[in-house]
Image: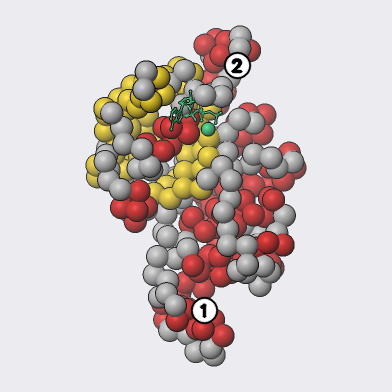
Amino acid sequence: MPGKVLVVKDLVKSFGGLVAVNRVSLEIEEKTLTLLIGPNGSGKTTLINLITGIYKPDEGKIFFDGGEITNLHPHEIFSRGLARTFQIPKPFTKLTVLENLLVACPRNPGEGFFSALRRAKWTKSEKEAIEKAFKLLKILRLDHLWDQEAAKLSGGQMKLLEIGRALMADAKLLVMDEPVAGVNPKLAHEIFRRLVELRDRLGITMLLVEHRLDIALQYADQVYVMASGSLISSGKPKEVVVDPQVIEVYLGG
Ligand SMILES: Nc1ncnc2c1ncn2[C@@H]1O[C@H](COP(=O)(O)OP(=O)(O)OP(=O)(O)O)[C@@H](O)[C@H]1O
Ligand SMILES: [Mg+2]
């Protein structure tokens, strides 16, 4: 599967009698931004929870970066380079923007690290982590806020910080559940532009769930559409929006 970062085959997940994800298969190419859309309750978050190991599938297989990850624990999946953000960002509000990135770094040397922040001399790994954090903060346009407490950030900046935290772990694929929910349109476009820049400059592949199609579609390379647990359409944004089945689930409601 050259060039495919993620391959999902025939995934099934039921909750009691409800089939939340019904034989879903999808493929994601390297360095692309894929959008997962569908009406409320169509199974998008459940699918993401399966991919990131939070739920175990009843059936089906998941391959990431050339290896099978079905049934691995979330931390094992994460350490292979599959990171995610949540619908509600959860930064450490008392820590600064920079510290929030540093604690998310897997090579974070632990306790001594914060005292190291105040020391004149940093070890090589600390220095590398800080350089990496600033590289991400620059792309996210948060670098000027590096010593601000996260609590003081705006909602949109909080979402960008959450993305930065997820990327500290050398993520190859970043999975995001509604990264611009509750953000005004201007800021939502700004966040998408930052995501596109992360894709183009750092080669990060992205899978994201989003309801606001008017904003999100123009940034997507590929779209998958779910309805009632099943995949009903996929393709380029232009193709998907004219698919009668997609129009029906969105407008036929
Ligand atoms: N842990 C759970 N236990 C029982 N039912 C669940 C659970 N998680 C999800 N479901 C059900 O599975 C179906 C799909 O839910 P899911 O959250 O995946 O939808 P979604 O597409 O993310 O919806 P939304 O757009 O509203 O976020 C829904 O009917 C939901 O009630
Ligand atoms: Mg959801």
Above or below 195: residue 230: above
Q: Amino acid at mark 1?
A: Phe
Q: Quadrant of the N terminus?
A: top left
Can residue 76 be seen?
yes
The x and y percentages for residue 139 are 60, 59
Q: How is the image coloured?
A: secondary structure
Distance from disc 2 to disc 1, alpha carbons, whole Å, reads 49 Å
| Camera-side residue of 130 and 95 | 95
The x and y percentages for residue 35 are 52, 33
Q: Residue at x 62, y 51 (%)?
A: 159
| Camera-side residue of 11 and 134 | 11
Q: Residue at x 58, y 33 (%)?
A: 210
Among all residues in the image, which is located at the extreme bottom? Answer: 120
Q: Which residue is mark 1?
A: 114
Secondary structure of the residue carrying numbered label 2: helix
Q: Residue at x 37, y 32 (%)?
A: 27
Which is closer to the viewer, label 2 or label 1? Answer: 1
Q: Earlier in the sequence, mark 2 or mark 1?
A: 1
Q: Residue at x 33, y 21 (%)?
A: 23
The x and y percentages for residue 40 are 56, 24
Among all residues in the image, which is located at the extreme left? Answer: 68
Q: Residues within 10 Å of mark 1 (few under 14, many from 20)?
A: some
Q: Amino acid at mark 2?
A: Tyr
Above or below 208: residue 224: above
Mark number, residue 250: 2
The part of the image, by quadrant, that contains residue 25 is top left
| Left or right: residue 107 compared with residue 57 | right
Secondary structure of the residue carrying numbered label 1: helix
Above or below 243: residue 219: below
| Camera-side residue of 33 and 130 | 130
